[in-house]
Amino acid sequence: MPKLTIDGQLVEVPPGSTVLQACEAAGREIPVFCFHPRLNIAGNCRMCLVEVEKMPKPQASCALPAADGMVVHTNSPTVHKARKGVLELLLINHPLDCPICDQGGECDLQDLTLFYGPDKSRFKENKRPVADKYLGPLISTHMTRCIHCTRCIRFLNEIAGVEELGAVHRGEHMEITTWVEAALSSELQGNIIDLCPVGALNSKPYEYRARTWELKKTESIDVLDAVGSSIRIDSRGNEVMRILPRLHEDVNEEWLADKSRFAYDGLKKRRLDVPMVRRDGKLEPVDWKTALAAVAERARGLAADRIAFLVGDQADCETMVLVKELAARLGTPHLDCRQDGAPLETTPRAQYLFNTTIAGIEQADLCLLVGTNPRWEAPLVNARIRKRWRRGGFVVARIGALFDLTYPVQDLGAGPATLEELANGRHSFAERLASVERPMLILGTGAIARPDGAAVLALAHRLAENARLVREGWNGFNLLHTAAARVGGLELGLVPGRGGRDLAGILDGIERGEIELVFAIGVDEIDPKRLEKAFVVYLGTHGDRTAPIASVILPGAAYTEKNATWVNLEGRPQRGRLAVFPPGEAKEDWRILRALSEAMGALVPLDTLARVRERMAELAPQLAEPDRIRRAEWGSFGRPGPVDPAPFVSPVRDYWRTCPISRASAVMAECSALAAARDRAATGTHG
Amino acid sequence: MSGPSLGPKQPYGAMAPDVATFAFTAENLEEAKRILARYPAGRQASAVLPLLHLAQAQHGGWLPKAALDYVADFLGMARIRVYEVATFYDMFNIEPVGRVQVRVCTTTPCWLCGSDAVLRAAREVLGCEPGQSSPDGRFFLREFECLGACANAPVLWIDDHFYEDLTYETARAVLEAVVRGERPKPGPQSGRKGSMPAGGKTTLFEVGE
């Protein structure tokens, strides 16, 4: 443990630390541009210069290893002079366009110029002109502002694993570019906007739309995948202007996937903002009373077992509490939150959770992917796997479709046959699996959301038992969900009651006329033709797939428009917060269900959010405390049986368009078209 | 009013003609494999410089994008990494230029010793300005940063050979010979041997036992 003296203060830092880290440990703030704690050290901006005794010149503290006995000065006249010089040089070619720059107000260069910047320029020559680059529909560039910190290049190389950005030419001619004017293909590219310490890389959809200081900042949770990333919703008036990641070391670190970051324009398009009732085959806008009465009218005299509830992929827990209570009051057991038809049950909990936890991936030494493409199903889980792989001593193997996951993968097979061999220890990889300390299995929902899903789940369970994935202090069995609502739904027990029908049963029942009234709560991933015959009450946000065939539409609130709880794939309950109000007549979903229950004469007496949450804690005590994971008990699950040899297919065919919000987004549509064009151009070279 | 221009620093496609494909000839492929064998497994990317030189020689003195992509794929490295290397070094041309490369060192030591005269000679003989190809398209003239032969300044670098200790007259003579298709003797043009002192030996008069 090296001991250093920083400005007269003695600090001790772990071996391998840099002088910069030592200074920070001593509470000194060192200005930086190129340094980033999650990226490799570049040492090229020179802003972090400090004075180290016995060294003749100021030293770049970010690149200097801390050594025992160093005496460092961070506040001496030499240091100030050095920093002033560095900043003056950086500003030589930096334009003075702060008043129109999107970064203005949250710019590192602007802030540091306040402290170290010259008050006027001594540079009489022309500034360097640089042509702006095309990086795709998400990132706009203003390359004259670039100070060549190379954070963007390092992020894409190291964290995103997509080597597409580089620095071409040399010295004063250096430019950050793809050089071929092609869009970036990473699904984490939006993060380089946050990393850029100046205004060179900006969000294209947000460009010139707002200034940072006029935005209201609401800390919330993302629901476009099941990772449950921490986000900050920046809004102005009643409009979401942009979405940024928030630090959560155990979930998203400080990154955010592009769909979560850029799909927000979908919140403003195709919205259902007024209740509607179908009259003479046409949906007509009505007031709330009429809409609720229409539902009550249809339900009157209807036997309870002709009513069914389906819950979609982004429903919040409060809404699901109301759904469960209302179904119970109406007396129907036909209730399912598993919109993809995955045969998951509510106990033991371990079968539907990502038990290793996302941060736990970093402790694993082997990862087996079964029927999943984490890069598209959960980009930040994939980034964690890559992070672990980069440290070395980590093997990733896969049973399922080939796809470039940004790290090398050993392919074992395509379908359940390989899984069976491996589960029975007859596959050559089984030895490898048995030889490691902390193996983990990631089972995709694509592997179990199929007719033989229960048997595949049983195989995965057998593999977990035989390969001892679950051992003292380690649970290596993981299910990778794609729907933000699913874990919450399972925790609350939104599965068929005694004698109840599951998703397939409900859909069959509709076809045979045995189910007449279906409450579809944000259900949009089911072929609407299969619902058509029933009287569908659609409670949701977008005119997506189900709304056009609904008999009654009840406009609900999107995730940015309500205070609600979601449980991420690890089983981590997290609270989202209201940033803007729902559009038009739309209301928070649980309130709608509460009013509906009254109209139907089956009152659910949960009148306030606090009461709903109390009831939620009764139904699922593990959800009572936000941001805390209750470890799941291990047990037996799945139903052994014959398996179909068909290969596993990921549920995400098109990363950019997976839910009503992203399907309504014009930005996501552009990304999707680009990805499709790229796939066509590269056919046959995948993987 | 100085400052770099936007001129030739455009992305590919703006300046260079489109060359659809590139592949090593059978002979160069053998050579490339020989070069590759010098590097340990997993470090093949280190061979990028010799392979780019090989590709440039094969393609008439410049590297089209197809050649860079070919080398990148050959070495299994990201294409942008090869673009970075090829644009970093002045020895690689990413636009079509005259086949014979004439480089005049104009860094301080050469400049002090009269590189201006050498450059003037080159301009007159080749009939073009630095950064341009000669009117007949055979030669490409450019100023270069330090060539590392300061003891023999000023220096002219033509293809693979250094011509040193030049004056306006000797530079002209060398260049005119090259234009005629001859291959003048490389090295100092002043008659001294290597970088021995110009006025004869000042030390080491005797050779020891």
Image (cartoon, rainbow, N blue to C red):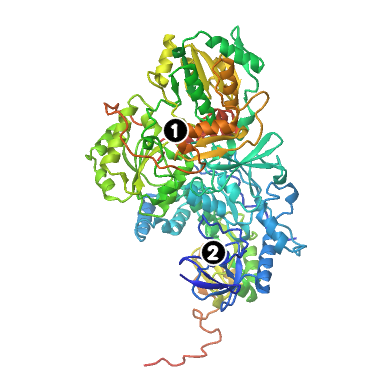
Look at the numbered disc 1 and give the secondary structure of its residue.
helix
**Side of A507 relative to A544 (left or right):** left
Q: Amino acid at mark 1?
A: Glu
Q: Position of residue A360 (x, y in %)?
A: 41, 48
**Side of B130 relative to A380 (left or right):** right
Observer-side mark, 1 or 2, equals: 1
Q: Position of residue A458 (x, y in %)?
A: 30, 32
Mark 1–mark 2 Cα distance, whole angstroms, equals 42 Å
Where is residue A208, by image quadrant? top right
Where is residue A80, by image quadrant? bottom right
Residue at image position (63%, 53%) is: A197
Mark 2, chain letter?
A: A
How many numbered marks have been drawn onto this rendered protein structure?
2
Q: Earlier in the sequence, mark 1 or mark 2?
A: 2
Residue with the mark numbered 2: A21
Look at the numbered disc 2 and give the secondary structure of its residue.
helix
Residue with the mark numbered 1: A491
Q: Amino acid at mark 2?
A: Gln
Q: Position of residue B139 (x, y in %)?
A: 57, 58
Mark 1, chain letter?
A: A
